[in-house]
């Protein structure tokens, strides 16, 4: 039971840390376009129910970085 509780707390911490609202901005500080974000979401499997969150977030980070954007935490 204690092991389950520790894993549940660890999972909650990971979700809260990775679930921060970030905005993607280019070098000039302009926000990303919705079409660029939708393209990366589609490419990385955001709409796939079998896709796990960690793989998706790593893929989206690489995709948006390749388009010239950087994540900023609001």
Image: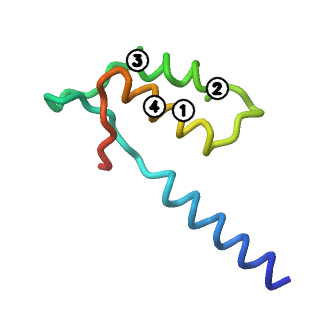
As helix, strand or loop, the secondary structure at mark 2 comes to loop
Q: Nearer the viewer, mark 1 or mark 3?
A: 1
Q: Residues within 10 Å of mark 3 (few under 14, many from 20)?
A: some
Which residue position is annotated with label 2? 45
Q: Are marks 1 and 4 in contact (CB under 8 Å)?
A: yes
Query: Which disc is residue 36 wearing?
Result: 3
Please indicate whether residue 49 sits to the left or right of residue 18 in the image.
right
Residue 35 at x, y percent in the picture: 41, 14
Q: Earlier in the sequence, mark 4 or mark 3?
A: 3
Which residue position is annotated with label 1? 59
Which residue position is annotated with label 4? 62
Q: Residues within 10 Å of mark 4 (few under 14, many from 20)?
A: some
- Give the alpha-carbon distance from disc 2 to disc 3, as whole Å: 14 Å
Q: Are marks 4 and 3 in contact (CB under 8 Å)?
A: no
As helix, strand or loop, the secondary structure at mark 4 comes to helix
Q: Are marks 1 and 2 in contact (CB under 8 Å)?
A: yes
Q: Nearer the viewer, mark 4 or mark 3?
A: 4
């Amino acid at each position: 039971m204690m092991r389950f509780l520790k894993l549940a707390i660890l999972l909650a911490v990971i979700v809260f840390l990775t679930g921060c609202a970030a905005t993607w901005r280019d070098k000039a500080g302009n926000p990303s376009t919705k079409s660029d974000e939708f393209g990366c979401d589609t490419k990385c499997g955001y709409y796939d129910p079998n896709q796990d969150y960690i793989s998706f977030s790593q893929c989206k980070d690489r995709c948006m970085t390749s388009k010239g954007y950087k994540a900023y935490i609001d």
